[in-house]
Image (cartoon, grey):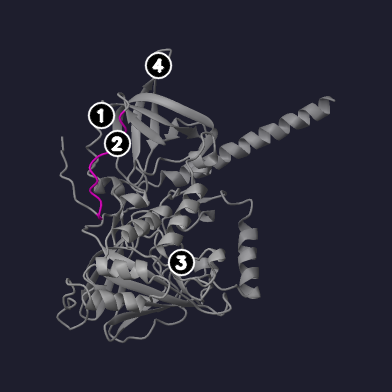
């Protein structure tokens, strides 16, 4: 029975590679403008359809540019135990993605890591539709 | 891997062993009779089956059966493994600098189906009828109508917000239906029953369907709704919901406003509602077609998805298009200048 179970499990995992968002990312961001940004979180906009993380990035000339980083749906992050308070202002993060087509300081947050290389938002899997996390409000 | 398949093991054995011959009814029956956990179905005070709670219809089963599978409605385990291999090869990681790469990492944001509870299903397609598991051909009228719609918007896709899809505009998402289709993520819903009503609250993208079950007729035919007008009734232990009065813009799979949807909700065990539907529109398809989608219980709650609250993507898509147009115009002006200089 376990062998059968394994075979069926494999089937179920087969098509689980979706790749689409609430809107067209290809229309919003420029495939010819890849960016790698190292910045400090200033604000988390915990809103649907996409969460937006605001970071300040220090440029080579010492000036600072504020970037907006587009991420996934907060609802899904909530189910994994994250809240709008999980990513505190002051946290240093690295963002890899593509810049907005209109040239604004916006990028899609394709891969987000902490300064030490650990991935953001990889935590307790509280799926099954929602273990409600306890917010650590400040 | 956190992929969770929740199905009674005896049902699972039947699904996997007798896959090619087992019908949904067999499976449901097995769940009722063979499972030691099979308790009498919960009922509401008015005696109807209790469908209430939080459910997901997340699925990895395609709506339409791959053509090469013909009329084979169920996989055997061996075929399942081969199918999986093929699918994985088709969906490798995106290459840097490709359009597919301009996205967020789904796994990182908890949006991969492997991170959700998924109702087990070894059907080769959600479509159960016609026997080839595929949407029947469109009528010439429908082909013309849809071609005209596409032609009208061609080149104007980003002219304004109203040229964008209903989903991007936060008006309607495919899971809302009817029929209620599984979507890529947050494919969760809550069902609440009261005397004379059943309500379905969809997480994506915000709507609640309030379905009267008191025998009232549909609203007048001049009243058209994005989600149509739904009325319900019980046939034994099955909730049957009949929907008409759609708006033409809803266009479920290219359907006209004459779309007629009949949905069936049947609670087959503590963890499963077998949801099926038949759609008919003589102005669109050469025959009606049907599908079956198991919904599995989740813990809940579902969260508000106030889609338009932060729909920056809409403005950004349009400003991206304006930037592209500007770039294109500058390029053309430059070329013209060069030609004139020659």
The disc, 2 or 1, on the residue closer to the chain's N-terminal end is 2
Q: Rounded to the nearest whole Å, what is the CA distance between mark 3 and mark 4?
A: 56 Å
Q: Which residue is drawn at 47% across and 51% down?
A: B85
Residue A109 in picture, x, y percent from top left: 40, 36
State the SS at label 3: loop
Tell me the distance, in whole angstroms, between the alpha carbons under discs 2 and 1. 8 Å
Q: Which residue is drawn at 61% across and 72% down?
A: B142
Query: Chain ID for label 2?
Result: A
Report x, y in % for residue B269.
Answer: 23, 72
Residue B247 located left or right of residue B33 = right
Q: How far apart are marks 2 and 4 (CA)?
A: 22 Å
Q: Is mark 1 on a helix, strand or loop?
A: loop
Query: Which residue matches tag 1?
Result: A89
Same subunit, labels 3 and 4: the answer reads no
Of B101 and B25, nearer the camera is: B25
Residue position marked by numbered label 4 in the rendering: A63
Q: Which chain carries label 3?
A: B
């Amino acid at each position: 029975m376990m062998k059968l179970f394994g075979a069926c499990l494999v089937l179920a995992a087969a098509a689980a590679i979706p790749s689409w968002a609430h809107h067209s990312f290809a229309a919003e961001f420029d495939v010819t403008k890849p960016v790698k940004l190292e910045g400090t979180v200033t604000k988390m906009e915990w809103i649907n359809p996409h969460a937006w993380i605001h970071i300040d990035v220090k440029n080579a000339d010492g000036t600072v540019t504020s970037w907006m980083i587009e991420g996934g749906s907060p609802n899904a992050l909530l189910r994994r135990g994250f809240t709008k308070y999980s990513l505190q202002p002051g946290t240093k993060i690295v963002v890899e993605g593509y810049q907005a087509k209109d040239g604004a300081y916006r990028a899609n947050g394709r891969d987000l890591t902490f300064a030490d290389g650990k991935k953001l938002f990889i935590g307790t899997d509280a799926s099954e539709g929602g273990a409600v996390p306890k917010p650590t409000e400040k | 891997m956190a992929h969770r398949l929740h199905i009674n093991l005896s049902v699972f054995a039947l699904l996997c062993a007798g896959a090619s011959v087992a019908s949904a009814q067999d499976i449901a029956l097995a769940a009722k009779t063979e499972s030691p956990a099979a308790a009498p179905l919960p009922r509401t005070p008015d005696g109807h089956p209790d469908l209430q709670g939080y459910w997901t219809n997340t699925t990895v089963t395609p709506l339409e059966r791959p053509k090469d599978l013909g009329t084979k409605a169920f996989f055997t385990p061996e075929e399942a493994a081969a199918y999986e291999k093929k699918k994985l090869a088709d969906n490798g990681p995106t290459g840097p600098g490709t359009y597919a790469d301009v996205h967020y990492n789904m796994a990182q944001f908890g949006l991969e189906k492997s991170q959700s509870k998924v109702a087990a299903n070894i059907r080769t397609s959600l479509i159960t009828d016609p026997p080839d598991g595929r949407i029947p051909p469109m009528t010439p009228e429908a082909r013309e109508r849809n071609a005209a719609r596409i032609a009208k918007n061609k080149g104007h896709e980003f002219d304004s917000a109203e040229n964008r899809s209903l989903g991007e505009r936060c008006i309607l998402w495919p899971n809302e239906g009817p029929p209620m289709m599984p979507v890529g993520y947050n494919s969760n819903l809550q069902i609440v029953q009261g005397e004379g009503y059943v309500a379905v609250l969809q997480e994506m993208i915000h709507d609640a369907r309030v379905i009267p079950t008191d025998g009232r007729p549909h609203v007048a035919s001049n009243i058209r709704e994005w989600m149509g007008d739904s009325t319900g009734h019980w046939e034994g232990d099955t909730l049957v919901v009949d929907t008409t009065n759609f708006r033409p813009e809803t266009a479920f799979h290219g359907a006209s406003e004459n779309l007629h949807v009949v949905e069936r909700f049947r609670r087959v065990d503590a963890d499963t509602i077998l949801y099926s539907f038949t759609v008919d529109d003589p102005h669109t398809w050469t025959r009606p077609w049907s599908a079956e989608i198991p919904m599995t219980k989740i813990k809940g709650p579902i969260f508000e998805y106030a889609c338009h609250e932060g729909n920056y993507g809409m403005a950004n898509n349009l400003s991206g298009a304006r930037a592209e147009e500007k770039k294109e115009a500058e390029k053309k002006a430059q070329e013209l200048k060069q030609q004139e200089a020659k």
